[in-house]
Image (tube, coloured by chain):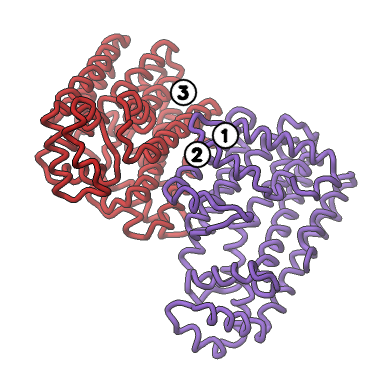
Chain colours: A red, B purple
Amino acid sequence: MNKIWNNYPEIKNELKEVVALMKKYTKCKDKKIENSILDLIESGGKLLRPAFVLIGSKFGDGDREKSVPTAAVIEMLHMATLVHDDVIDESKLRRGKLTIQSKYGKDYAVYIGDYLFCCCFKILATHSSLRALEIDSNAMTRICIGEVDQLNSRFSTKLSVKDYLTRISGKTAELFSISLFLGAAECNADKKVSRELKNIGHNLGMAFQIIDDILDYEGNDESIKKSAANDLKQGIYTIPFIYAYRNNKNAFSEIMEKEFYTDEDVEKIIKIVEENKGIEMAKELANKYIEKCFKGINRLPENKYKKVLKELAEWILIRTY
Amino acid sequence: MNKIWNNYPEIKNELKEVVALMKKYTKCKDKKIENSILDLIESGGKLLRPAFVLIGSKFGDGDREKSVPTAAVIEMLHMATLVHDDVIDESKLRRGKLTIQSKYGKDYAVYIGDYLFCCCFKILATHSSLRALEIDSNAMTRICIGEVDQLNSRFSTKLSVKDYLTRISGKTAELFSISLFLGAAECNADKKVSRELKNIGHNLGMAFQIIDDILDYEGNDESIKKSAANDLKQGIYTIPFIYAYRNNKNAFSEIMEKEFYTDEDVEKIIKIVEENKGIEMAKELANKYIEKCFKGINRLPENKYKKVLKELAEWILIRTY
């Protein structure tokens, strides 16, 4: 488990329960299925989303009988989307380990993702409420639409800032948002507080994704640049590109005529994006969401978990940045 | 809608409500998503599974508020699995129309399948019960495991009759079984009757799949033989093959050494299967399930839908056979 949780022993203990529940519900007579999911569970994801569910629950009655299963469902929904995303992206590695699709093949990965979805709904059926089911399935619908949006807009230079924001709102912010919200709502928190947590989650998720997309362009780390290259080769343009392109279409004209990008083309694109204020403006945008996020946190009622949430948001959003 | 339903106007009317509900819940601001699902809904599937839900409900209070959404969920779960199966099989056509994956690509089909899953759970959340959610998600888990089983056993000649039965029990019989069961159970039918319906659905589904697999080997229709060829080329051995191989391994020895099968090889395999009683024995097996199915139907309490169920089972199982 990520070292960050050593600072928050109560959350860490509850996260252990979440992991145990995930393992219980993904047990399967087919050991290949079980082990590939076990690999995923133990591959060292940060468990941010389930932690947010737990933190959200502390603004209500904090009942573990509710918060732990809700957290497990959210993390497994996240895992299911990762498995299917890797199929689409043909990603070789995830968290430094071979992806299910590169290890066992695409076909297998499609079913493992489906199996994970099923396990989520099994947990919901046993431990949760129809309201949580509704919220989870609505969120998943928006995530799917966000992913399809991304597919549809491949290689489209018509992508506007608004389109990008809609896309990442579905793709990333949605799960952060319902994590904090469901934790609170399932534990009977005040409605106004639950709504505030929902907005905090949304703004945090938006900032998180924008920063991630910025790091792809400015990271010194080769592996990070590879991620930008991978996106660009698939025709996925993120916010630094969109700003720079809007600022100076001409600078891109030659390179955009190509049918596919070589590594040198990618290097060139990254440079043009930097020169045309793509990164600078993306940072300003991220800052707006970060600000909204912290303003929201400050508005929360006093509670020792308000501080925890603030520290985590700082860790996530201000890290290398 | 299939002509068969003209004989059963009440079922036909309710099926229309099912289709309307499916359309309502799959509405989407992304018109490409909505239209590709609309294509699926309108592509002329027989709607057997939702019809079984409706018939099951008649052994309880027949409350449409329960039976119609349950039927829609089952049909959409079925559609979701079809979309993902087509990704795996790389099928070009389904019900005579281009599959989503051949029309829009694999990536898109993965998300459309996911989107359909989400829509099912949205209907469940709004119209149904946690019990139905549990039964549906358990069934889906078994379907996934059945599909993975099939992937794992590709090109394995160790496949036993028992393995085959386990596989088709998950892959096909499960949904037939829960269709009749959930229709009855959600409409408060007597528990013993619900269980009887569950068994009838299982036996009907088993017979249905075995007959389907037999037709692949003995059908005169070229398109049917193509289906056998497609399975064989993917290393999927069904019951006629399994029996014939068990009866006379030597007859297959030369052909089984090949790394892949040409059309001629497939012709040869089909002939060897026939000569070694593969089809004959598979028919005997199908008959056992058909017999069990009708015995179960006869045990049901008197009710005008008992006759309907019997006629449908005859239509499904005795058709060209």
Q: Quadrant of the C terminus of chain B?
A: bottom right
Q: CA distance from mark 3 to mark 1?
A: 27 Å
The answer to whether tags 1 and 2 share a subunit is: yes
**Type of the residue with mark 3:** Glu
Residue at numbered disc 1: B26
| Dot placed on the residue nearer the N-terminal end, 1 or 2 | 1
In the picture, measured across the screen, residue B231 lies left or right of residue A307, that is right
On the question of residue A53 being in view, the answer is: no
Residue under numbered circle 3: A186
Secondary structure category for the residue under label 2: helix
Name which residue lies at 29% across and 29% down: A11
Amino acid type at mark 1: Thr
Q: How many marks?
A: 3
Q: Secondary structure at mark 3?
A: helix
Residue identified by numbered label 2: B115
CA distance for labels 1 and 2: 8 Å
Label 1 element class: helix
Camera-near label (2 vs 3) is 2
The structure residue drawn at horizontal position 27% and vertical position 17%, both measured from the top left corner, is A293
| CA gap, disc 2 and disc 3 | 25 Å
What numbered label is drawn on residue B256? none
Which of the 4 image quadrants contains residue B243? bottom right
Q: Is residue B232 left or right of residue B240?
A: left
